Amino acid sequence: MRALVAMFSGSLFGLGLLVSGMTDTAKVQGWLDVTGAWDPTLAFVLGGAILPMLVAWRVAARRKVAVLGDAIPALPEQVIDGKLLGGSALFGIGWALAGFCPGPALASLGWSGIGGSVFVLAMVGGMIAYQLVQRRVAVAA
């Protein structure tokens, strides 16, 4: 049952990215180009994502157990630190340069050609490199 729910949820998410234009790098870069040929249409995508999540968070806050039976995890600590700011900056720079963020990049793998594949490989490589650096830092501490 979990696999079926995951497949449905992932498919719905990917379809939403495709229909909304989030897998079109030119559209995303147009959204990010606030000083040039700005394309505000992705604001509707953001609103369309935020509104249902506000409802979902309210419902989840009242529940002890998720729909499929797992415990609902505690909220993460809300700390604004150097890691959060640095990671946000790197994410934004990468998003602006490539026009992709992780979800849309994966959703467009089937048709984005070599550029999309290189982006996903580089993204996964960056994630692995971060984990390796974190392990070395933890060992040195």
Image (cartoon, grey):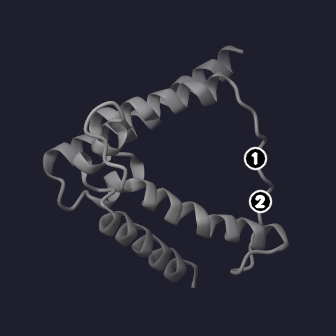
SS of the residue under disc 2: loop
**Residue 71 visible:** no
The residue under the point 31% across, 65% down is: 18
Element at badge 1?
loop
Q: Can residue 37 be seen in this view?
A: yes
Q: Quadrant location of residue 42?
A: bottom left
Seen in the picture, residue 64 relative to 21 is either above or below; the reply is below
Q: State the residue position of label 2.
A: 73
Under mark 2, the amino acid is Pro
Which quarter of the figure is the C terminus placed in?
Answer: top right
Residue 139: percent from left, percent from top: 66, 20
Instruction: Name the spot of residue 57 as percent of width and height, x first.
Output: 72, 65
At 51% from the left edge and 74% from the top edge, which residue is drawn?
6
Residue at the image point whose x is 36% and y is 39% from the top: 32
Relative vertical location of residue 23 with respect to residue 118 in this rendering, above or below: below
Residue 100 x/y as whole percent: 33, 45
For this orientation, the residue located farthest to the top is: 140
Whether 40 is drawn above or below 45: the answer is above
**Horizontal side, residue 72 vs residue 26: left or right:** right
Front-most of residues 3 and 90: 90
Kindly identify which residue carries mark 1. 76
